[in-house]
Amino acid sequence: MKYRNLAWLIILLLTILILSCEKKDEGTVVIREDLEQEIIDLINYYRDTTGKSELIVDTVLRREARNHSVNIATGKVPFGHEGYQERANTIFTEVGGTVFGENVAEGNYPDASYFIDSWLNSPSHKENIDGDYNYTGVGIAETERGVKFATQIFLKK
């Protein structure tokens, strides 16, 4: 009987431990279309000042960027580029194209210029912004705590 109670106690403790380590949904997220458009406008303004062509918004790229930002904001995937190849494959299948790039950022920024500044101060992110792309899609998901997750996808078609 003593070992049986100990076994149940161990099972209970393991169950609690497992449930406490499970990824939690961060709650409701809001798609920030206003900031998405600001990023597109600021990126195109920057590209214009450097002699690059304006990026055209594509709805499939926007959908994939939004989905990725929401997945990060809700804890379904960690912050970063997880699922990058799947997004690229989906876009190449649905839209076409030859080259794919992606920038992600996280912050409690009041406006889009902070995302742009962080990307322009990172060589790998700036390389995407300066790249030979002609299409883009931006997705920004904001958590209840005001943390914003931004994804910008670039495509050469």
Image (cartoon, rainbow, N blue to C red):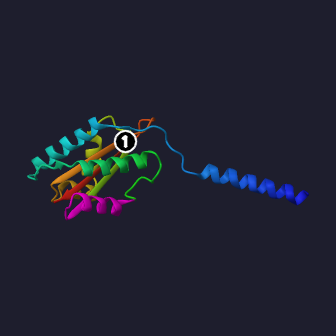
Residue 90 highlighted magenta (yes or no): yes
At 31% from the left and 45% from the top, the residue drawn is: 139
Q: Nearer the viewer, residue 89 or 46?
A: 89
The answer to whether residue 43 of the structure is visible from this angle is yes
The segment highlighted magenta reads 83-100
Q: How many marks?
A: 1
Residue 23 image position (x, y, % from top left): 54, 50
The stretch drawn in magenta includes residue 135? no
**Amino acid type shown at disc 1:** Ala
Residue nearest the observer in this picture, 8 or 143: 8
Residue occupied by mark 1: 141
Q: Is residue 151 visible?
A: no
The image quadrant that residue 73 belongs to is top left
Q: Measured along the vertical axis of the image, is residue 145 above or below residue 119?
A: above
- The residue sitting at the front extreme is 94
Indicate the quadrant containing the N terminus: top left, top right, bottom left or bottom right.
Answer: bottom right
- The dominant secondary structure in magenta is helix
The residue drawn where x is 73% and y is 53% is: 13
Give the quadrant of residue 32: top left
